[in-house]
Amino acid sequence: MCFINITMNIGIVCYPTFGGSGVVATELGKALAQKGHKVHFISYSQPVRLDSFSENIFYHEVSVSNYPLFDYQPYELVLASKLVDVSIFENLDLLHVHYAIPHASAAYMAQQILASKGWRVPFITTLHGTDITLVGKDASFEPVITFAISQSNAITSVSESLKRDTYKHFGVRKPIHVIPNFICIEDYTKLRAKIGEQEIEKHKKYYAPNKEKIMIHISNFRRVKRLEDVLKVFEKVRKEVPVKLLLLGDGPERPNIERMCRELDVCNDVRLLGKVVNPDDYLLFSDLFLLPSETESFGLAALEAMASRVPVISSNTGGIPEVNLHGFSGFLSQVGDVEDMAKNAVFILNNPEILQKFRKQAFEQALTFDIHKILPMYEKLYDEVVKENATIETNK
């Protein structure tokens, strides 16, 4: 697969938060900019991963009116207006919107306004997960989302599982291209080299002073992440292997987890570290990643762990089996089967040679999702969409 030879003006619409869709959209934009494309991020605040100067990257803030008539500010409308403005004055070749709600419908509205002014700007919608599996299935959203997705000039999803869910729950008939989430392997190898093995061991000793193994979980602490299962698995593993647990993140389940730690009497071996700006630093000295989620469209957190050479114990739901290969990069279990998860965790942690084998294999699996393998898929799709749009203009 080859890269396209021409550079483009690309508008990227995303949520600017720590969520997976915003992170992937930002990293994609940065990679495109490095290839020479001009990338225009359009959101209500600067994306958190857009934290330094980069050539060919531009940011356009969507300012939401505080007009007192509105109880809820009409973000979709002002976003559509901003898309029109940026498309015209930056001469965009296409828009790439991440997360269906409300970005796809705003892009469609902008496209219609642009057409009335003699501009034709195609848009691509990338489905990331909860926009389909959770929010999108709400009956109050379904007709609009189905229509907006269907009007997209191209649709992508981050996993085969999410593609199947979209066809199952929505009346979408257009082809959906599966382009998986990605990581930049080079960033992880550079981080390890920068910190150094000696410093990494020093950090590990701080959390595991008696050479305990370290299990780790990173999430937004929502119920769907099944934090209770994380603690149940840990409580079983610690009976077999000296181990500590690091919980990175925050959210509505935190009070429940704090209570459960006391009930299980594991507080001395569990550290709740809250929202951490650089979770990859903690993955460097971790031994096993836990992801027992109820559902995951992809499992980006698992992929990030694997890129840090940390094997994964996970549920087998959604797109996770497409990322975590059973018996190779870690193990898969049925949702809620904490006994099996604990057994698999003990198997990996109890033997240094087995742990090293799984570390190596986890990294090998992560290599298949390196951005240099995924970026050409997006560039090829951009090229096809822009050429198709040009053909339509020519035939008018």
Image (cartoon, rainbow, N blue to C red):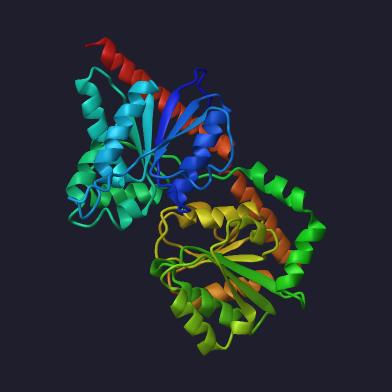
**Towards the viewer: 16 or 268:** 16
Q: Could you tell me which residue is drawn at 58 percent across and 53 percent down?
A: 304
The location of residue 113, given as percent across then percent down, is 22, 27
Residue 149 at least partly seen: no
In the figure, 261 relative to 106: above or below?
below
Position of 152 relative to 287 (above/below): above
Choose between 250 and 226: the one closer to the eye: 250
Residue 94 lies in quadrant: top left
Residue visible at 66% across and 48% down in the picture = 188
Which residue corresponds to the image point at 60% horizontal and 57% vertical from the top-left?
A: 305
Instruction: Place residue 104 in its image quadrant.
Output: top left
Relative placement, left or right, of 86 versus 345 is: left
Image x and y of residue 196, in percent:
79, 54
Residue positioned 56% across, 26% down in the render: 35
Q: Position of residue 301 (x, y in %)?
A: 53, 56
Answer with the quarter of the image where residue 105 lies: top left
Classify the position of the C terminus by image quarter: top left
Please tell me which residue lies in front, 284 or 372. 284
Residue 184 visible here: yes
> How far across and down, in percent of the image, does residue 326 sit?
55, 60
